[in-house]
Image (tube, coloured by chain):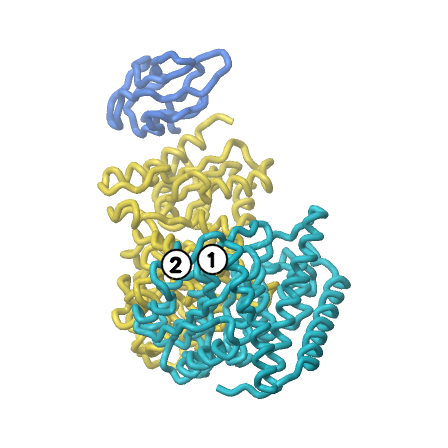
């Protein structure tokens, strides 16, 4: 069963966020709560924290992508 | 396996099944159609004595003579014009434009003449012609030798557009394109030049407008053509176990096999279109339009188009790869779509 | 070359017919314009009748002709039935193109009239194809492509001249130099005095003649046709002429009055009339009869047009692709 870190809901209306940076690469270990990237929303830059622990398998987005809430960003194994 | 001397075999002996390269498959299609119909003629730059810079017409001038297979000067407008006029006169001409990018030099005879003559003449004249051109990026030939341009031809009523992905389909569809009584743009991807495939025995001509399911699945309908059909299949293997993708290769873009896509969407409810051409106003946008109009209720989520970036093709390989969809890009899109909550 | 008396009288009548058609069409279009119902465009060939009739007099029914947007005269001289021409100009279902083409897109397969063309120089490269087809089939059909002084500046002409010369295909290039391309004087489209002289640049004969003298036109055309039929390849012809009207109905006249007057004195129909009288081919009464006959044929064709239905939009579904 694949596990994903997904785009969190960052404001009340649940707007999509734009990926500003990604801190991890495939193969990196990631712990729960660790910062994995930054997203821009309502002119603020916010951290994305890992909601799954393990090793990064696949990065599913690129810097600059606008991603709706709930969509998978990073696959973790 | 008995060998058959195809050069001297009478037309009635059907060719056996065997493995051929892409260009040899197209060469064979031309050979068979020229045998079948004396009106089929073939010309273009370096097409005659040399056999074409891509080897498209290798051996054909020797077999069919200089009146039917010939060289032209370096004049795309005149080549295309000759093709259109010859078709109006009742021949069935086939031309090679050396790179689809050079179509810019001969758009008037194609767009303003060939595509429109049947209508403008009230049906008095038809234009049964075929334009063969290599398209596509990945060979570091830079911005003016890497385009596909199918969107231009698709937005022109009166043209048919064929873009196969497998070697046997190139042969079978080229035969059908030549037999079609309308102008057909036949675009083959130069990145597929080295591929080989099993050609079935006999006179096999796939009808235009008929797509095919390359990989059956239940989670996601992926429509991908030309080089991207191969990449979509590769991506489906990468994500197998996490995504069960159904990959459809439409083969013909116009007329488009919408019914095949809708049938798949009844199973999956998710549509991903992949093409190499720039995403703006591309075939992906058109497929999404058609599906939205005819099958909106089948969709569980918004369709996605993974297409080339809106950037003229840069030269360096690393830049090229950043512009056209890679297997990883397609795999990522498949995972995102299937694992997004509904 | 020799015309019989009957042929000459027929040429005169046809030239008058073309002239009357163009004048009547302008009248009808002007009425429609007042009603807010102007059908697009009208490019009158008034003044250029000598070229249309003279060139076609040297062609067979099965020779191919590619015309321009100023092609009513070409169409009639080549043999499209007159009522089909009038019906098409007015968008009727009985028109030569079923109402799908209009003034600029008359086609008629029976006489190998391969279309007027809305693109300047657009028909020229297509003539390469019909010329090649004749050679491939072993017939001695020739192809004539018409273009104007403006068209002589288009790249398509030069590619086609070059290719036809290399291949020695039976393609005859006829430039109707009426001295203006829309509003641009020919000196703005050609840096030399005679467009015909450009034949030399392609290694083919380039002939220049008075387009308003039927005999000169016919003789020049015959020379090119004979060459082409014998397999000796293409010829470039330039006929000097003048159109009596501005480029089309919606562009106002701007050419100098003295120039227009001078060319009116060289009217090809008036000249032919004088020639026929001088040669004893017809007297004034017979010329009047020919003019009357042309007028009657035109009126019949216009009546046919008025009686004809408009095209049926449901036929659009099958109009694009051949089965």
Q: Colour of chain B?
A: yellow
- Residue C22 image point, x, y percent: 63, 63
Q: Earlier in the sequence, mark 2 or mark 1?
A: 2
User: Is C110 or C154 nearer to us in this picture?
Assistant: C154
The quadrant in which the C terminus of chain C is found is bottom right
Judge left or right: residue C48 versus residue C81.
Answer: left
Residue at image x 45%, y 32%? Answer: B338
Kindly indicate which chain is depicted in cyan in the rendered structure.
Answer: C
Q: Determine the image quadrant of residue B122.
A: bottom right
Which chain does the numbered disc 2 sit on?
C
The answer to whether residue B199 is seen in the rendering is no
- Residue B330 image point, x, y percent: 37, 38
Q: Given the current orientation, which residue lies at the most extreme front position?
A: C258
How many other residues sit within 10 Å of disc 2, few (<14), some (14-19) or many (≥20)? some
Q: Which mark is residue B26?
A: none
Residue at image x 66%, y 60%? Answer: C25
Q: Which circle, 2 or 1, is nearer the viewer?
A: 1
Q: Which residue is mark 2?
A: C153
The answer to whether residue A19 is seen in the rendering is yes
Q: Determine the image quadrant of residue B289.
A: top right
Residue at image x 38%, y 69%? Answer: C196
User: Is C251 or B292 nearer to us in this picture?
Assistant: C251
Q: Which mark is residue C180?
A: 1
Q: Colour of chain A?
A: blue
For label 1, the SS is strand
- Residue B139 image point, x, y percent: 25, 49
User: Is B254 or C252 nearer to us in this picture?
Assistant: C252
């Amino acid at each position: 069963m694949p596990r994903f870190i997904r785009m969190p809901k960052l404001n009340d209306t649940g707007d999509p966020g734009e990926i500003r940076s990604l801190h991890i690469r495939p193969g990196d270990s990631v712990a729960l709560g660790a910062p994995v990237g930054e997203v821009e929303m309502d002119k603020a830059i916010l951290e994305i924290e890992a909601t799954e622990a393990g090793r990064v398998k696949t990065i599913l987005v690129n810097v600059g992508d606008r991603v709706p809430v709930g969509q998978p960003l990073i696959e973790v194994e | 396996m008995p060998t058959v001397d195809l050069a001297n075999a009478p037309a009635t002996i059907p060719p056996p099944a065997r493995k051929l390269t892409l260009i040899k498959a197209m060469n064979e299609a031309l050979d068979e159609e020229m045998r079948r119909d004396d009106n089929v003629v073939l010309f273009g730059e370096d097409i005659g004595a040399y056999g074409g810079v891509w080897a498209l017409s290798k051996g054909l001038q020797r077999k069919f003579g200089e009146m039917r297979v010939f060289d032209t000067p370096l004049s795309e407008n005149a080549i295309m014009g000759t093709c259109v006029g010859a078709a109006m006169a009742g021949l069935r001409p086939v031309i090679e434009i050396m790179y689809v990018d050079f179509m810019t030099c001969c758009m008037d005879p194609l767009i303003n003449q060939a595509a429109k003559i049947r209508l403008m003449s009230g049906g008095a004249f038809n234009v049964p012609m075929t334009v063969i051109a290599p398209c596509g990026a990945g060979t570091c030939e830079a911005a003016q030798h890497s385009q596909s341009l199918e969107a231009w031809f698709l937005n022109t009523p009166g043209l048919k557009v064929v873009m196969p992905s497998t070697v046997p389909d190139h042969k079978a569809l080229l035969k059908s394109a030549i037999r079609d009584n309308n102008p057909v743009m036949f675009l083959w991807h130069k990145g597929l030049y080295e591929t080989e495939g099993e050609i079935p025995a006999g006179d096999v001509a796939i009808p235009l407008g008929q797509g095919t399911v390359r990989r059956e699945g239940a989670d996601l309908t992926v429509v991908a053509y030309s080089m991207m059909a191969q990449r979509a299949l590769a991506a489906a293997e990468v994500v197998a176990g996490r995504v069960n993708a159904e990959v459809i290769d439409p083969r013909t873009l116009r007329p488009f096999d919408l019914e095949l896509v809708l049938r798949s969407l009844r199973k999956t409810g998710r549509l991903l279109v992949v093409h190499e051409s720039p995403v703006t106003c591309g075939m992906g946008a058109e497929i999404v339009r058609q599906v939205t109009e005819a099958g909106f209720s089948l969709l569980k989520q918004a369709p996605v188009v993974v297409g080339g970036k809106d950037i003229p093709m840069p030269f360096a390989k690393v830049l090229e790869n950043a512009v056209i969809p890679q297997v990883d890009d397609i795999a990522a899109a498949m995972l995102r779509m299937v694992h997004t909550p509904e | 070359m020799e015309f019989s008396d009957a042929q000459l009288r027929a040429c005169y009548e046809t030239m008058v017919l073309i002239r009357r058609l163009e004048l009547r069409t302008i009248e009808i279009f002007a009425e429609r314009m007042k009603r807010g119902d102007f059908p697009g465009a009208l490019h009158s060939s008034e003044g250029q009748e000598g070229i249309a009739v003279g060139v076609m007099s040297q062609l067979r029914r099965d020779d191919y002709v590619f015309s321009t947007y100023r092609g009513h005269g070409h169409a009639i001289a080549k043999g499209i039935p007159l009522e089909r021409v009038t019906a098409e100009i007015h968008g009727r279902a009985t028109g030569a193109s079923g109402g799908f083409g209009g003034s600029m897109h008359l086609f008629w397969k029976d006489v190998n009239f391969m279309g007027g063309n809305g693109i300047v120089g657009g028909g020229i490269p297509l003539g390469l194809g019909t010329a090649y087809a004749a050679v491939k089939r072993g017939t001695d059909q020739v192809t004539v492509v018409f273009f104007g002084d403006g068209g002589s500046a288009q790249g398509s002409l030069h590619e086609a001249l070059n290719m036809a010369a290399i291949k020695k295909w039976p393609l005859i290039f006829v430039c109707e130099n009426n001295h203006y391309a829309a509003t641009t004087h020919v000196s703005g489209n050609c840096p030399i005095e005679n467009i015909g002289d450009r034949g030399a640049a392609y290694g083919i004969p380039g002939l220049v003649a008075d387009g308003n003298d039927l005999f000169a036109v016919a003789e020049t055309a015959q020379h090119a046709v004979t060459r082409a039929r014998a397999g000796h390849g293409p010829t470039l012809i330039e006929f000097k002429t003048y159109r009596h009207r501005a480029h089309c109905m919606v562009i106002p006249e701007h050419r100098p009055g003295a120039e227009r007057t001078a060319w009116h004195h060289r009217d090809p129909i008036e000249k032919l009339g004088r020639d026929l009288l001088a040669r004893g081919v017809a007297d004034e009464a017979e010329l009047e009869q020919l003019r009357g006959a042309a007028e009657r044929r035109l009126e019949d064709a216009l009546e046919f047009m008025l009686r004809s239905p408009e095209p049926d939009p449901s036929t659009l579904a099958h109009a694009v692709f051949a089965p």
